[in-house]
Image (spheres, rainbow, N blue to C red):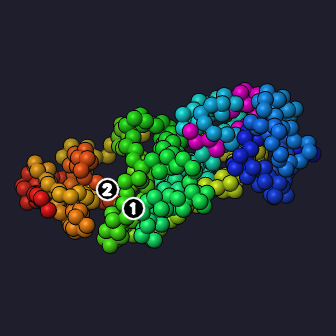
Amino acid sequence: MAPIKAALLGFGTVGQGVYEALKTHREQLQNVLGKEVVIEGILVKDRSKKRELDEHVLITTDFDEILNIDGLEVVFEAIVGEEPGFTYLSRALDKGCHVITANKVMFAKHGRSLLDKAEALGRYVGYEATTAGGTPIIRSISQLLQVNEIHAVEAILNGTSNYILTNMREKGLPFHDVLVSAQELGYAEADPASDIEGHDAFYKLMILSELSFGETPKWEDVERKGITEVTREQISVFKDWGYKVKHLARIRRDRDQFISSVKPVLVDADHPLYGVEDVQNAITVETSLAGKVTVQGAGAGRLPTASAMVEDLTYVLQPQPVTRKKKTEQHADNNSESTDFTTVGEYVVIGSSVSFHGTDDVQILKQEIKEEHVFLLIECQVSTATLLKENPELAVYEVAGKEKNKKVEQEQKDVLLKKVTNL
């Protein structure tokens, strides 16, 4: 029986992992698919570089040579950047190939275009590896979308940031020391900006938004903040108060608008992502029928990412793959009296001095002075927290999972209001 012919675009860490996984799991794949999967060609930047590959494999710098492989069925894309990845995969679909990608930047920007083209051509785009390595987030959400509606997504999507925050807390080390350790272990790149500034998690969140809601918010409207300003002192107080700081990517659809962010957030032991540590990734999906569903696994690395791409391969090539279901528009507005309510949440405010003025209700739940900084745990309206964040002298952390709609009368505001000046 003729094998399934595939090609690899890129032979870096991920590309090598895919090649290795296809070889080491050849028998398992053949049992599932009924055919052997063979890499026929690999697109590289430098043909002269020595590589340990089967003799029959075409090594080329010319993408046209890849497309001209007779009987090519699948193209794995494991290169970096928006281009030429998008052009390559678009041309591969036109040629009649299924495509599988790990390129999160490209897919965040062009995923909808590729999915629409694939649907029109009767082909398939696999993109499990774009979001969280070996954690089956994409397929889990796709399965939920068969019946459930997705209300919200909350996730730890960057293993590097999670590793740094975990080790700052557990070892009491400053940010820079843990970053150096992460680089030495291969968890962080020489230039770690994409991870620690939140860009990596942002692109992944946009991919999950497209999948969950059929669209994304305007990118400029998404609050994005990295972890570079999280200090050892802050983490120590958070730990004493029973909180962990996590770099969370979150999106919720509220009627006709999105509420979305990628930023450091505090979680307590009741939060489903509280125990996700080191380089692990996890996602919690809030659904209409199944409630909250959490999936956790390895977030990155050669073999976890390769695993996601190989699983995509089996998903498309089995006799009756599940058809991707487009998400219908949501018109949920179950609270006709929403204008009578305000959203209230809990926040930790940190500064050398903290003052509250005005008429917004602020309830102080806890306070501590440590190393000349005032730490306040408060309950207040979201509008109040937004104003506080605009003050450059203050650090403001949201406590996840504490949001609630609260009917606020003026007399309640007067009782709750506490002014704190020059603590």
Question: Which quadrant holds residue 272?
Answer: bottom left
Image position, residue 75 (x, y; %): 75, 38
Tell whether 245 sits left or right of 190. left
Q: Is residue 11 magenta?
A: no
Q: In this view, does 159 lie above or below 81?
A: below
Tell whether 52 sits left or right of 269. right
Q: Earlier in the sequence, mark 1 or mark 2?
A: 1
In which quadrant will I find the N terminus?
top right
Question: Which quadrant holds residue 98?
Answer: top right
Residue 227: in sight, yes or no?
yes
Label 1 Cα crowd, 10 Å radius (few <14 / some 14-19 / many 20+):
many
Circle 1 — which element? strand
Residue 289: in sight, yes or no?
no
Q: Looking at numbered disc 1 in the image, what kind of residue is underneath it? A: Val
Circle 2 — which element? strand
Q: What residue do we see at 66% from left, 45% from top?
A: 322
Image position, residue 400 (x, y; %): 35, 58
Q: Is residue 262 above or below residue 291?
A: above
Label 2 Cα crowd, 10 Å radius (few <14 / some 14-19 / many 20+):
some
Q: What residue do we see at 11% from left, 58% from top?
A: 421
In which quadrant will I find the C terminus?
bottom left
Tell whether 300 sits left or right of 364. right
Mark 1 — residue? 245
Tell whether 94 sits left or right of 149. right
Q: Which of 222 and 74 is in front in this view?
A: 222
Over which residues does the magenta segment extend?
Answer: 89-105
Image position, residue 115 (x, y; %): 61, 34
User: Label for residue 397?
Assistant: 2
